[in-house]
Image (spheres, rainbow, N blue to C red):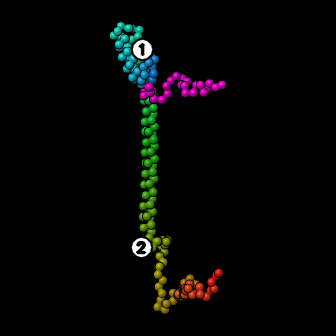
Amino acid sequence: MKSSRSRSRGKNRNNRPQGNIINRVFDSSGPEGKVRGTPQQIIDKYQTLHRDAQLAGDRVNAENFQQHAEHYIRLLGEAQKEQEARREAQEAQQRERQKEREERDAQRNAEREERNADRKANKREKQEDTVGDLPRFVTEGESPQPDVIDVGSDGDSGLVETVESAPKPPRKPRTRKPKSDPTSEGEDQPAAE
């Protein structure tokens, strides 16, 4: 036995068409038979039938066609209002995103400018703190120490020699073994059988 769910699958529960109603094709069962088309096409057809019935003097059919046309006019009007509301909501959302993007970009630009200003200030400080090419580590009132030690005429600098400062002995060049001749090796060894 099938459940009621499987039987109702694909049916619209509230009898309202879903999706884009403006471009959807409807089958309308009117007094003159079926009329098929988009809501605007059905409205035009029923209004034409209404006018023809009025000219023929058939007030009942004219009113019936007018009611059918009004039904589709209401459907189309609601769909257009919904579509307009969705469009406005999307535009508002896009404006909000654009505003957030602009604020984020402005913040990034401000941070970038601040970093650049800090770099320039640091660079200026470094330039001010140097004497020639040497960094300045002297406190106020002290004179800077010279980088070159003046060795007197006797050649004694007064420094203590350490292992690291002692001159290294020259390296001896490596000698390679002479390559052995492969033909002479084969003669010395007996052939394997």
Residue matched to label 1: 32
What percent of the width, then of the height, locates residue 20?
45, 29
Q: Residue furthest bottom?
A: 154
Report whether residue 74 is seen: no
Q: Earlier in the sequence, mark 1 or mark 2?
A: 1
Q: Quadrant of residue 117?
A: bottom left
Taking the magenta stretch, the answer to whether it contains residue 8 is yes
In the foreground, 75 or 44: 44
Q: Residue furthest left?
A: 55
Quadrant location of the N terminus?
A: top right
Taking the magenta stretch, the answer to whether it contains residue 7 is yes
Whether the residues at callouts 1 and 2 have beta carbons within 8 Å, the answer is no
Vertical comparison of 185 with 115: above or below = below
Vertical comparison of 188 with 134: above or below = below
User: For mark 1, does the 10 Å Cα neighbourhood hold few (<14), some (14 to 19), or many (20 or more) residues?
Assistant: few
Q: Quadrant of residue 186?
A: bottom right
Q: Nearer the viewer, mark 1 or mark 2?
A: 1
In the foreground, 178 or 81: 178
Residues at marks 1 and 2, CA–CA distance in whole angstroms? 104 Å
What percent of the width, then of the height, locates residue 43?
40, 20
Residue at 46 percent across and 71 percent down: it is 135
Residue matched to label 2: 132
Residue range of the region highlighted in magenta in the rendering: 1-25
**Element under disc 1:** loop
- The chief SS type of the magenta part is loop
Residue at 41 percent across and 10 percent down: it is 61
- Which amino acid does the dot numbered 2 rest on? Gly
Residue at 43 percent across and 73 percent down: it is 133
